Amino acid sequence: MLDVISEVLGYAPNVKIAGHNQFDNKGCPSFFIPSWLKQLDIPEYTIEWRDLFG
């Protein structure tokens, strides 16, 4: 998944990255994507921190 994210950021550097469970009350992925992205040193401005259900 990190390879795909890196590729997307290569051609769309201002895109916001989020897990679909941040927008739909579903259990997958089973972790909070923004926290995971921060651990991977993904640029902060590309991380969508909104969590409608958290």
Image (cartoon, rainbow, N blue to C red):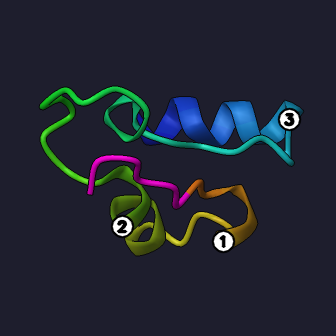
Q: Is residue 33 magenta?
A: no
Identify the residue at horizontal 31%, vertical 34% (top origin).
21
For the stretch drawn in magenta, what is the main secondary structure?
loop
Q: How many residues crowd mark 1 within 10 Å: few (<14), some (14–19), many (20+)?
A: few
Residue type indicated by callout 2: Ser
Residue topped by disc 1: 44
Q: Position of residue 15 (x, y in %)?
A: 78, 41
Left or right of 40 on screen, residue 32: left
Compared to residue 13, the image places residue 39 above or below, namely below
Mark 1 to mark 3 CA distance (whole Å): 15 Å
Residue topped by disc 3: 12
| Circle 2/circle 1 CB separation < 8 Å | no
Give the mark, 2 or 1, whose residue is nearer the N terminus.
2
Q: How many residues crowd mark 3 within 10 Å: few (<14), some (14–19), many (20+)?
A: few
| Circle 3/circle 2 CB separation < 8 Å | no
Residue type indicated by callout 3: Ala
Identify the residue at horizontal 36%, vertical 51% (top origin).
33
Compared to residue 23, the image places residue 43 above or below, namely below
Give the mark, 3 or 2, whose residue is nearer the N terminus.
3
Q: Quadrant of the C terminus?
A: bottom left
Q: Residue furthest front?
A: 52
Q: Quadrant of the N terminus?
A: top left
Q: Position of residue 51 (x, y in %)?
A: 41, 53
Read off the magenta span: 49-54
Residue topped by disc 2: 35
Q: Position of residue 43 (x, y in %)?
A: 68, 67
Q: Position of residue 2 (x, y in %)?
A: 45, 42
Residue type indicated by callout 1: Glu
